[in-house]
Amino acid sequence: MGKLTPLAVGERNAAKLMDMTLPEFKSLVKCGSLPAPVQIAQGPQRWRVADLDAILNGEAMNSEQITW
């Protein structure tokens, strides 16, 4: 079996993926600059790796919110 790529990660790993400290990551999530986590059933909250990737690639940008 090949290497598995995570679909979702916890808060600490999400911060690591973004190369941020945990407080920086939490702050950006709180103010809405980064996506909120998803709740998995009644279990833990996780961040979709695809959502974080879309932020970094500019795919999640809302052009209506940009002021030139």
Image: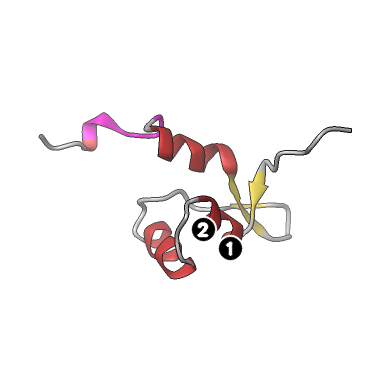
Say the numbered circle drawn on residue 12: 1
Q: Amino acid at mark 1?
A: Arg
Question: What is the quadrant of residue 2 in the picture?
Answer: top right
The residue that appears at 69% across and 60% down in the rendered structure is 44
> Mark 2 highlights which residue?
15
What residue sits 65% from the left and 46% below the top? 8
Q: Give the residue type that dot 2 points to.
A: Ala
| Image point (60%, 57%), residue name | 13
Q: Nearer the viewer, residue 36 or 15?
A: 15
Q: Are marks 1 and 2 in contact (CB under 8 Å)?
A: yes
Q: Position of residue 65 (x, y in %)?
A: 22, 37
Q: Is residue 48 above or below residue 21?
A: above
> Which residue is at 37% across, 32% downward?
58
Which color scheme does this rendered protein use?
A: secondary structure
From the viewer's perspective, tell me whether residue 66 is left or right of residue 27.
left
Please indicate whether residue 14 sits to the left or right of residue 7 in the image: left
Task: State the image coordinates of residue 27 (x, y, percent, origin top left).
Answer: 38, 65
Q: Residues within 10 Å of mark 2 (few under 14, many from 20)?
A: some
Residue range in magenta is 59-64
> Does 2 appear in magenta?
no
In space, the residues marked 1 and 2 are separated at their CA atoms by 5 Å
